Image (tube, helix red, strand yellow):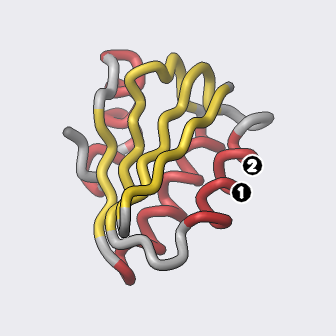
Amino acid sequence: MTINKAKNENTLTVSVEGRLETTTAPELDAVIKENIDGITELVFDFSKLDYISSAGLRVLLSSQKIMNKQGEMKVTNVNSIVNEILDITGFSDILTIE
């Protein structure tokens, strides 16, 4: 998995490439926690994300809880496989997906 982050004033965009699963989710969680202070908009770009497991979903959920207090979060460029996982788990109802 590859993580690229870009800060633009109060916006943090995190692009994730590869598979977000048990072994890689802690890395994404650490990147979010290290960079979230002062952020009012968090954007996950999943255009190159191939798969997300329950561990990855937990990172999204914890990020959403933080952003509920300090701004907004959205998930963009979700492919059909990841979108199906988000639908089945009910995450599509609690996340903003564009």
Q: Is residue 86 above or below residue 35?
A: above
Whether residue 84 sits left or right of residue 16 in the image: it is: left
Q: Which residue is mark 1?
A: 30
Kindly give the residue lying farthest to the bottom in the view shown: 69
Q: Quadrant of the N terminus?
A: top right
Q: Is residue 92 above or below residue 21?
A: below
Who is closer to the viewer here, 32 or 82? 32
Instruction: Give the crowd class for mark 2: few <14, some 14-19, many >=20 residues within 10 Å.
Output: some
Q: Nearer the viewer, mark 1 or mark 2?
A: 1
What is the x, y in percent for residue 20? Answer: 62, 31
Q: Which residue is mark 2?
A: 26
User: Quick one: SS at disc 1?
Assistant: helix
What is the x, y in percent for residue 50? Answer: 51, 17
Q: Amino acid at mark 1?
A: Ala
What is the x, y in percent for residue 67? Answer: 40, 71
For residue 31, what is the image quadrant?
bottom right
Whether residue 67 sits left or right of residue 72 in the image: it is: right
Q: Amino acid at mark 2?
A: Pro
Is label 1 in contact with label 2 (beta carbons under 8 Å)? yes
Q: Quadrant of the C terminus?
A: top left
User: Quick one: SS at disc 2?
Assistant: helix
Kindly give the residue lying farthest to the front in the view shown: 9
Kindly give the residue lying farthest to the right in the view shown: 23
Kindly report the distance in space between the C-alpha atoms of the residues bearing marks 1 and 2.
Answer: 6 Å
Q: Is residue 39 above or below residue 90?
A: below
Residue at point 58%, 53% (across, down):
59
For residue 37, what is the image quadrant?
bottom right
Residue at point 59%, 58% (across, down):
32
For residue 45, what is the image quadrant?
top left
